[in-house]
Structures are given as structure tokens and as C-alpha cells.
Amino acid sequence: MPARIGPYNTGVKPNRAVLCLWTAALVATACASSGRSVALRQLTTAPCDTARRAEAAVDWFGPDSPEERLRLSAWCESVGPAALRAPERTIPIPDIALSGVVVVTWKVHEGGGDIQRLMTDLRRRSRDGSGIAPAPALVLLVQEAFRSGEAVPVQVPADLRAPRAIHPRRPAFSDIVKVAEQEDMWLAYVPSMRNGRDSREDRGCAILSTLPLSNVAGIELPWISQRRVAVIATINARQGNTPWQLRAVSVHLDNRRGRSRQAAALARVASAHDAGGIPIIIGGDLNTWMGPGEDAVRQIDAVAARVRECGDAPTFRFRRHLDYLFTTLPADVRRGCQILPDVFGSDHHPTMLRLFAPDLL
């Protein structure tokens, strides 16, 4: 089993006050353009409360209507618990003003994307030829991450129509927990759904980071046609001698109509960032088949501006732009954004944003 994130010796005190502010925002009603409102609340237990779960380190939020709770809990029973991991070795926290931070959002197609090859490529790009410049910190906002093994239950509720299995050609290390172990990185993974009835596999959103993670939360989004859960965590670093934090979100919206309801609920969460004084970055596959003009994009853009320097080039086949970054970080810390030309084994292109350090990439 992966090591769980425990006390953080990061020099940055976890900000529980921010979680309280987020809770207040979640309890508020999230209204989408459809006119139907969805109330989100903090859940007092893990969303499917069974004896096998041990998720005290994860806060949970979700819809409070009995109808939605019934559907979401049934799907939740088919997946394993959230997976949290801290590095086994002590890693000094870099000064991001010197090293910079690279934030990538990427849908990895059920583990088909080669995350380790992507990280190697990012580090190669950051070299300035002198060998002196420190490697940038990496924060990966991953969607359709894959996890297999004993953490995923054998049994599936009899009345659950499990999602079909997606089994792309996978690299040697494709399981998101094993990638984190191999690279000795911080991980927050929250599964959304099972990957087929007959396989002990689940899939969901993850944050994989070389910087410490704290205050992890899972947010069940309003039901459309499948259970979708965003994962949120605080990234902890230092800027010179000053502690620095960033609230990061990885999200994967439904590919059916009505996803703007999910975006609206997520936007209500993001709107709490101002009260806490911590900037936020949101990355994900929004499944916007009609492009950036969709209401789902506008809902999030209203509270955390879309990073328009990333451009609108296709991130998926059929010339579709489905993947986005949004942030409240000021423009003067951003050093450029691009959609990478390689898909690294996935069916989506990674979108990469550079922060702080000179433009070496």
C-alpha cells in the first residue's frame, strides 16, 4: 500500500482556515445555466462509508440531495479509497523563484500516457546548457489516471452498470501509484469510477508533484451520466525565504450534455480562493466538444481566468480543444504556456504552463 501523507515538514503550516472557507463555498448553491441548482456540502464520512476505507486524511464534498447521493454512492462502492503518498526520502524544498515551476494538465487515457517520459522531456527542455540551472519543480494535474490491485474491491454492486473497461497500450509504469513510487513523488489520487466490471482497476483524477501536498480534498461533482470526482490539494513551496502556496485542482467533466452544471459547482469551490488569499490553478479535460465558447468554460473562467496564452490549438483528435488551465496567478509570474506536440502515448496533448523562472523551456 502506498505511504499516506502525514504531518508535513515543509516549513509551511497547513491552512485549515482555508478549508473552512472552501466548505462555506461548497455549502452554497451552485447554479448552472440550465436553471437547476445543486447544493454541495461537506461529507462527514467518506462518500461510501464502508469498513475498508481509511480516508481520514482526505476531506470530502459532494451533492446533498438523496437522489444524487444514492447514485454516487453506488458507483463509489465499486472503487478503492483515495491514495495519498509522500516521498520516502527528505527532499529540500526548492526556491521556486530560481528553479521555477512547471504545471501540466494532461488526460492520460486510462494510463496509456507515459508520465515518466513526459517528465524526462520536461526536464530535458529546462536545461540551459550550463548544467547550473536547477530543475524546475513539477506539478502534474492528471485526468483518467489508472490504479489497479488489491486496493480496488473484487465485488461490484449487483445493480451497478459498471463503466466499460478502457485498456490502451500502457507503458511499464502506468499505474499512477506506481509512478509516484518509482519517481518518489507526492501524490493525491481520487478515483471516480471503476474500469470495467471484471478488472480490479479504477480511474480518476490525480495530482503528482515534486513539491509537498497538503489539505487534500475530493469533490464529487453533480451527476450527469457517470460519477466524476475532482481532486484538490495545496502545493507548498518557498519563494526566497517566504512560504508560498498554490491551491491546485485536477478535474475531468462528463462528456454528455449538462457538464456546465459540474463546471458551475467547481466554480463555486474556486470562488472561495479570494477569502483565503491563496491563488488557485485548475487544470482538466472539460470535454468541450463545441470548443472554448462552451458554458462549462465560461463558468470556471468567471472565477479563475482561463490561461489564454495556452492558445486554442487542438488537444484531441478531430481538431477538438478539450483541455484547459485556469488560474488566479498574476500574469507577471507566468512565463509562457504551450500545448506540447507529442501525446506521449495518450490520446490527448499535455498543456504546459511555466511559472517564475526564466523561460528555459
Image (tube, helix red, strand yellow):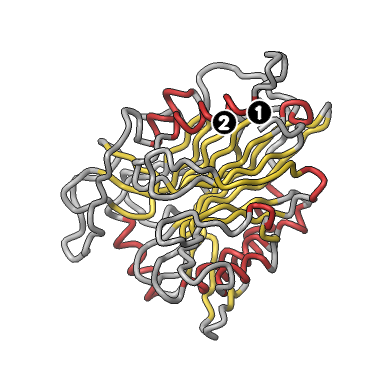
Please state if 161 lies on the left or on the right of 91 as rendered.
left
Q: Looking at the figure, which quarter contains the N terminus?
A: top left
Q: Which of marks 2 and 1 is in front?
A: 2
The answer to whether residue 60 is visible is no
Which residue corresponds to the image point at 51% horizontal and 26% vertical from the top-left? 120
Seen in the picture, residue 91 relative to 344 is either above or below; the reply is above
Q: Which residue bears the numbered disc 2?
A: 122
Please state if 121 lies on the left or on the right of 248 as rendered.
left
Seen in the picture, residue 229 relative to 149 is either above or below; the reply is below
* Mark closer to the chain start, 2 or 1: 2
Which residue corresponds to the image point at 62% horizontal and 71% vertical from the top-left? 298
The one of 294 and 164 positioned closer to us in this rendering: 294
Amino acid at pointer 1: Pro
Q: Residue 246: image x %, image y %?
A: 69, 44
Give the crowd class for mark 2: few <14, some 14-19, many >=20 residues within 10 Å: some
The one of 234 and 261 positioned closer to us in this rendering: 261
> Are dots 2 and 1 in contact, CB under 8 Å?
yes
* Outermost residue to the top: 131
Which residue corresponds to the image point at 53% horizontal and 68% vertical from the top-left? 291
Amino acid at pointer 2: Leu
Label number found at residue 136:
1
* Outermost residue to the bottom: 35
Give the crowd class for mark 1: few <14, some 14-19, many >=20 residues within 10 Å: many
Q: Looking at the figure, which quarter contains the C terminus?
A: top right
Please state if 67 lies on the left or on the right of 262 as rendered.
left
The one of 220 and 341 positioned closer to us in this rendering: 341
